[in-house]
């Protein structure tokens, strides 16, 4: 009997609020997609900057803000080499930046390290899956 009441409420509220949800979904689809693309591009820029800095001798990365957006500047020693994303000349981006905030990127963790960091039941399941994939 309780399942029948739940279905009844679902139908009642679906008929009442369903059209509003459809209109809201259509209206908010484009802004949500644009926001997701913007966040993904920022994450890819950060990863690219860190990957390049790992290949350089004395490579470091500095986060600066240009027009309200984060920009990652790659250094080799004391020389600024590139910016991700390339939105302005590197010299313009770092002219007022605090260089003491530069960070040395860490190499990405291996799958084995990520599994051991997970711990517990998750690690046990991942280890068994890793063993199966190697056979």
Image (cartoon, rainbow, N blue to C red):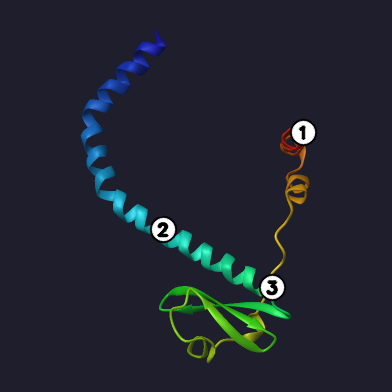
Locate residue 104: give its quadrant: bottom right
**Label 1 packing within 10 angstroms: few (<14), some (14-19), many (20+):** few
- Labels 3, 2: front one: 3
How many numbered marks, from 0 up?
3
Q: Position of residue 17 (x, y in %)?
A: 24, 33
Q: Position of residue 91 (x, y in %)?
A: 52, 90
* Relative vertical location of residue 87 with respect to residue 4 in this rendering, above or below: below
Q: Which residue is denoted by mark 1 in the rendering?
A: 135
As helix, strand or loop, the secondary structure at mark 3 comes to helix
The Cα–Cα distance between marks 1 and 3, rounded to whole angstroms, is 33 Å
* Relative vertical location of residue 127 with respect to residue 55 in this rendering, above or below: above
Locate residue 48: give its quadrant: bottom right
Marker disc for residue 55: 3
- Contact check, label 1 and label 2, Cβ < 8 Å: no
The Cα–Cα distance between marks 1 and 2, rounded to whole angstroms, is 38 Å
As helix, strand or loop, the secondary structure at mark 1 comes to loop
């Amino acid at each position: 009997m309780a399942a029948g009441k739940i279905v009844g409420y679902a139908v009642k509220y679906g008929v009442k609020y369903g059209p509003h949800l459809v209109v809201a979904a259509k209206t908010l689809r484009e802004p949500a997609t644009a926001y997701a693309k913007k966040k993904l591009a920022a994450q890819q820029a950060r990863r690219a900057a860190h990957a390049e800095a790992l290949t350089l001798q004395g490579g470091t990365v500095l986060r600066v803000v240009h027009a309200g957006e984060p920009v990652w500047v790659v250094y080799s020693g004391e020389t600024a080499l590139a910016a991700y994303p390339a939105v302005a000349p590197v010299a313009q981006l770092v002219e007022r930046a605090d260089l003491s905030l530069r960070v040395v990127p860490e190499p990405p963790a291996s799958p084995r390290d990520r599994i051991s960091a997970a711990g517990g039941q998750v690690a046990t399941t991942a280890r068994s899956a890793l063993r199966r994939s190697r056979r």
